Image (tube, rainbow, N blue to C red):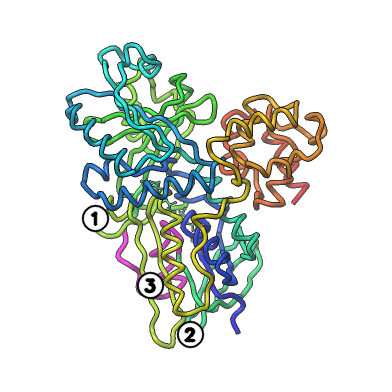
């Protein structure tokens, strides 16, 4: 008998979503991630949970409807990670006629059925806070509702849920060889040690590595894939409102400028084909300048390339020629030849539909295993067992219970941990009860929790993926954090 029912290669959003779904349906799951969870494309997304206006413009109404219905699912199962926002598009006739844009938004409202999110609206930016950050010529903007998400925490909490349902999640574990007979025999290098496990079926969810893993590790015909890079920039906060701005760039791309943590703005995305090693992804100076130029067409405050504090960039596989469409849809292939253990290959796709994609992927295995029914759409992710409209109440309750929490810290921690905050703060009466401090917000208690429950091993795992505290943490505190983690590992 095989050690596991299902082995998953890759701890990005696709891999962990499948691990969550399959373990909750009763399968014995192992997931191997060569680095940290979400260290690939899944922490370089535009962070949007949306139906995607550009898909609507291409008249793919079915896809928009599916994505908007998933938006509702995410709000219900991850109310801490997913925040509804008002998106504002300044209107001008250079790219799209304003009336056409307005009509698309009315249709977007209708397809999404909106439920509890407010409808789209026209705003006079000369008398509305949305206009404060914008250059003079804009008189009108259109607002509509969508959501933003903390992408890398979404990955981690899917993995936490999978682990709590029995999945064996191994980070720092690279699969180097897989032999296929009626079962899979996998060889991995797990934190320096060579190990072997067997599984009845295998998922290749290795993102930008999909083709090379197929070729060199699984030794099966590699799908005809290309690789694409996307990038975004982080600058100091450019506006005070809580809106996400959507700019129509002069190449018809939509550029998003979103509030990022409390003090920063994320601007993106730019994308193009990628050549090279997916482990080494740098964003070119031309891409950074492109995003600065896009912002400068709209915002009063200028953004120079020297103002860029961080770039966020990732690479993923795309199917042959139809790169853009394939990436957004995501691609999946299932190989179940007679006498051979099944192989499922999955890559690309957006965050919004990742849960649904995983559900469909696992459902393909129903012919091979007895399995419980679909379940992920109705069950909250860890810490997400509250109503999304009550997020502010959760923040208030946290501040009432742990009086030493500042407003920003409480908001950050509720957004990250939801109702599981108590596992970190426990009975603490003051901040010093939580161990050493690293920068203004991070404490020893939080670090220990992340190491024990969320697979954090190195400072970057905490500073850039389980949080974004790397944006504000002084160098001396990072060194202290590294020493603290090394002592605790
Ligand atoms: C070009 C691009 C465009 C995108 N467009 C959108 C978009 O429009 N909307 C949106 O919401 N999101 C978008 N995203 C982000 C989206 O979140 C990701 O595409 C999605 O999360 C898919 O991630 P994944 O799990 O397939 O890959 P990844 O997150 O890259 O995960 C793959 C993992 O496999 C691991 N791995 C590789 N080889 C091995 C091995 N041998 N053993 C063990 N582990 C291994 C890697 O370390 C990596 O962590 C885009 C991302 C990119 C890069």
Badge 3 local density, few (<14 within 10 Å), some, or many (20+)? some
Label 3, label 2: how far apart the Cα atoms are: 16 Å
Image coordinates of residue 260 in percent, x first then y, are 49, 31
Query: Between 277 and 86, which is closer to the camera in this rendering?
Result: 86
Query: Between 378 and 367, which is closer to the camera in this rendering?
Result: 378
Image coordinates of residue 17 in percent, x first then y, are 50, 58
Q: Residue 342 in magenta? A: no
Badge 2 local density, few (<14 within 10 Å), some, or many (20+)? few
**Residue beneath label 1, please?**
322
Secondary structure type for disc 3: strand
**Residue beneath label 2, please?**
181
- Which label's residue is closer to the chain start, 1 or 3? 1
Image coordinates of residue 430 in percent, x first then y, are 80, 29
Secondary structure type for disc 1: loop
Residue stretch in magenta: 205-226
Question: Which quadrant of the rendered structure holds the N terminus?
Answer: bottom right
**Residue beneath label 3, please?**
334
Residue 404 to residue 186: above or below: above
Q: Residue 220 in magenta? A: yes
In this orientation, does residue 372 appear?
A: yes
Determine the residue positioned at 55% across, 77% down: 199
Badge 1 local density, few (<14 within 10 Å), some, or many (20+)? few
Residue 18 to residue 231: above or below: below
Query: Between 68 and 353, which is closer to the camera in this rendering?
Result: 68
């Amino acid at each position: 008998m095989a050690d596991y029912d299902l082995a998953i290669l890759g701890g990005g959003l696709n891999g962990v979503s499948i691990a969550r779904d399959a373990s909750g349906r009763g399968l014995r799951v192992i997931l191997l991630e060569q680095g940290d969870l979400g260290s690939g494309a899944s922490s370089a997304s535009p962070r949007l949970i949306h139906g995607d206006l550009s898909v609507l413009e291409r008249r793919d109404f079915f896809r928009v409807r599916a994505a908007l219905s998933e938006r509702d699912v995410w709000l219900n199962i991850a109310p801490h990670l997913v925040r509804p926002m008002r998106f504002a598009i300044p209107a001008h006739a250079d790219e799209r006629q304003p009336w056409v844009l307005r009509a698309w938004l009315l249709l977007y409202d209708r397809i999404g059925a909106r439920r509890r999110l407010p409808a789209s609206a026209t705003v006079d930016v000369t008398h509305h806070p949305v206009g404060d950050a914008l250059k003079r010529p804009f008189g009108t903007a259109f607002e509509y509702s969508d959501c933003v998400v903390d992408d890398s925490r979404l990955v981690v909490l899917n993995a936490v849920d999978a682990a709590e349902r029995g999945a064996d999640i191994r980070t720092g574990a690279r699969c180097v060889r897989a032999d296929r007979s009626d079962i899979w025999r996998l060889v991995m290098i797990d934190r320096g040690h060579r190990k072997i496990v067997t599984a009845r079926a295998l998922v290749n969810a290795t993102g930008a590595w999909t083709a090379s893993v197929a070729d060199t590790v699984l030794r099966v015909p590699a799908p005809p894939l290309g690789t694409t890079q996307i990038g975004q920039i982080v600058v100091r906060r450019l506006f005070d409102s809580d809106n996400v701005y959507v700019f129509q760039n002069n190449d018809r791309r939509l550029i998003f400028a979103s509030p990022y943590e409390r003090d920063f703005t994320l601007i993106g995305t730019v994308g193009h084909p990628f050549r090279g090693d997916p482990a080494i992804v740098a964003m070119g100076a031309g891409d950074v300048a492109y995003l600065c130029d896009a912002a400068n067409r709209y915002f009063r405050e200028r953004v120079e390339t020297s103002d860029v504090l961080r770039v966020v960039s990732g690479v993923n596989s795309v199917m042959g020629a139809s790169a853009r469409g394939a990436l957004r849809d995501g691609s999946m292939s299932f190989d179940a030849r007679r006498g051979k253990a099944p192989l499922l290959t999955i890559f690309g796709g957006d965050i919004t539909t990742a849960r649904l994609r995983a559900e469909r992927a696992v459902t393909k295995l129903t012919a091979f295993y007895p399995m419980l029914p679909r379940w992920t759409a109705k069950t909250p992710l860890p810490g997400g067992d509250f109503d999304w409209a009550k997020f502010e109440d959760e923040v208030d309750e946290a501040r009432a219970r742990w009086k030493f929490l500042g407003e920003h810290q409480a908001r950050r921690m509720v957004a990250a941990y939801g109702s599981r905050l108590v596992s970190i703060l426990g009975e603490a009466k003051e901040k010093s009860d939580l161990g050493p401090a690293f920068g203004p917000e991070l404490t020893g208690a939080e670090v220990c929790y992340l190491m024990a429950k969320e697979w954090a091993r190195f400072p970057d795992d905490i500073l850039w993926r389980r949080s974004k505290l790397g944006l504000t943490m002084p160098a001396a505190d990072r060194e202290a954090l590294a020493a603290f983690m090394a002592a605790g590992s």
